[in-house]
Amino acid sequence: MSSRRTIWTGPLQPTPESSVYTVRISFTPSGIPAVRVLAPKPRATAPHRYRNGDLCLYYPKDASWTPDQFIWRTIVPWTVSWLFFYELWLDTGKWLGPEAPHDFHKKAG
């Protein structure tokens, strides 16, 4: 299997009234896609992003995405949804999109 990295950079617009965002999606055939909004940059406090600024689009433990799926059928629509809910968050201060539990601070028993 190839380890060649593929990178797509292009515009996405969640609604006709929305900003046009420049997004970069990079991935390897056996890896996890990395998605970043290049412009306009999301606020530093925007939720559902990893520490490096990449978008958190799905909960990896529920197998929503696997390397055998098409990026255009999964990651691209999920990115558009993230942008939509990001704009709502800007207006309301609340994330109104779907969320998964984050057990980062779960204590060992």
Image (cartoon, rainbow, N blue to C red):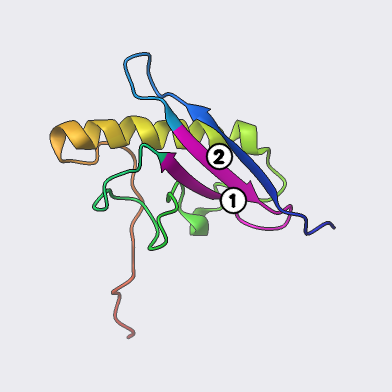
User: Mark 1 and 2 residues: CB-CB less than 8 Å, in contact?
Assistant: yes
* Residue at the (28%, 74%) spot, across then down: 105
Amino acid bearing label 1: Pro
Residue 88 located left or right of residue 51: left
The part of the chain drawn in magenta is 22-38
Amino acid bearing label 2: Ile
Q: Residues within 10 Å of mark 2 (few under 14, many from 20)?
A: some
Check the image and name the residue furthest to the right: 1
> Quick one: 97 or 106, which is closer to the camera?
97
Between disc 1 and disc 2, whose residue precedes? 1
How far apart are the two marked residues, 1 and 2, measured between alpha carbons? 8 Å
Instruction: Relative to 3, say whether 74 is above or below.
Output: above
Residue 50, quarter of the rendered image: bottom left
Q: Secondary structure at mark 1?
A: loop
Report the predominant secondary structure element of the magenta stretch: strand
- Rendered location of residue 61, percent (x, y): 50, 59
Instruction: Relative to 89, say whether 5 is above or below.
Output: below
* Residue at the (39%, 37%) spot, across then down: 82
Magenta residue check for 92: no
Residue 74, quarter of the rendered image: top right
> Quick one: 100 or 77, which is closer to the camera?
77
- Rendered location of residue 11, percent (x, y): 51, 28
* Residue at the (65%, 51%) spot, across then down: 27
Q: Which residue is mark 2?
A: 75
Check the image and name the residue furthest to the top: 16
- Rendered location of residue 56, percent (x, y): 42, 51
Q: Secondary structure at mark 2?
A: helix
Q: Which residue is mark 1?
A: 33
- Rendered location of residue 100, percent (x, y): 36, 52
Residue 22 located left or right of residue 10: left
Magenta residue check for 27: yes
